Image (cartoon, rainbow, N blue to C red):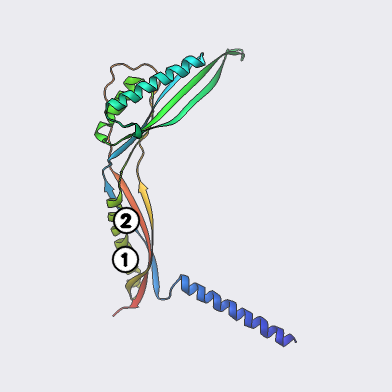
């Protein structure tokens, strides 16, 4: 009986080892090498984003709320005059914050209300971004947030980065194969990870009345698209 139990246990153990070996071979094919390649392509941005806002503080909530709405309507009208479509303007927040103010003794002296309205503007002609900002401020905007740039269609840059990543992967694989006295064959498994690396310049304006403002210098710079590929190549004996 004991011998039979030991025989059954040994048989099960061999079956488990066999299944594990089969699974490992399916995930990691024999006679292969796996490497990661990196590729990056650069291009000039063709779209810009900026958030323009109005922030007012008053003791009278109705006065602050109405004045904020009036200023924001003026900003929207000014942007439309520049050719910005309503579809490219999106409200990102309408907020009311009550703030209690205290005297030197620690007693509450008054309560004011901070009202904020912010709109996100998509600028499809980035040569006009300085005009957009100036027009918004002249119309009543006293906050500027999250000025950033993008590429509307990064497909071409992605393709360039992809080619560079594959070439980089093959070069890395060949260097490893040379050290092993082997040659890189055809790719067996390929996967990729895309990373659009767009920088985000950030600016914020303060409150207060602004008169006779000069256009702010705004530089778009360059953006990059990075792509990573993992490729498993077949390995063959060097001829």
Residue 198 position by quadrant: top left
| Residue indicated by mark 2 | 39
Residue 141 lies, with reference to residue 1, above or below; the image says: above
Residue 63 lies, with reference to residue 132, above or below; the image says: above
x, y (%) of residue 46? 27, 40
Residue 227 visible in this rendered orientation of the protein: yes
Residue 141 visible in this rendered orientation of the protein: no
Residue 39 lies, with reference to residue 35, above or below; the image says: above
Residue 70 position by quadrant: top left
Q: Are marks 1 and 2 in contact (CB under 8 Å)?
A: no
Say which mark, if any, is on residue 170: 1
Residues packed near mark 1 inside 10 Å, few (<14), some (14 to 19) or many (20 plus) = many
- The residue lying at 30 percent from left, 31 percent from top is 84
Residue 145 lies, with reference to residue 16, above or below; the image says: above
x, y (%) of residue 228? 36, 57
- The residue lying at 33 percent from left, 63 percent from top is 169
Q: Which of 202 and 178 is in front in this view?
A: 202
Q: Distance between the residues labelled 1 and 2?
A: 12 Å
- The residue lying at 33 percent from left, 22 percent from top is 137
């Amino acid at each position: 009986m004991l011998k039979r139990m030991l025989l059954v246990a040994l048989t099960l153990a061999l079956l488990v080892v066999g299944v594990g070996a089969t699974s490992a071979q399916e995930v990691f094919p024999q006679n292969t090498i796996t490497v990661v390649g990196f590729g990056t392509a650069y291009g000039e941005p063709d779209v810009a984003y900026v958030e323009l806002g109005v922030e007012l503080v008053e003791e009278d909530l109705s006065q602050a709320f109405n004045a904020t709405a009036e200023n924001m309507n003026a900003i929207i009208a000014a942007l439309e005059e520049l050719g910005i479509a309503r579809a490219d303007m999106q409200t990102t927040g309408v907020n009311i914050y009550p703030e209690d103010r205290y005297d030197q003794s620690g007693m509450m002296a008054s309560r004011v209300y901070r009202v904020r309205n912010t709109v996100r503007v998509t600028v499809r002609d980035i040569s006009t971004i300085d005009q957009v900002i100036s027009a918004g401020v002249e119309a009543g905007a006293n906050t500027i947030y999250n000025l950033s740039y993008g590429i509307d269609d990064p497909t071409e840059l992605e393709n360039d980065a992809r080619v560079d990543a594959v070439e980089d992967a093959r070069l890395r694989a060949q260097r490893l194969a040379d050290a092993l006295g082997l040659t890189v064959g055809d790719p067996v498994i390929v996967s990729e990870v895309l990373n659009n690396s767009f920088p985000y310049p950030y600016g914020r304006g303060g409150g207060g009345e602004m008169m006779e403002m000069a256009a702010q210098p705004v530089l778009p710079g360059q953006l990059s698209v990075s792509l990573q590929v993992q490729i498993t190549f077949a390995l063959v004996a060097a001829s």
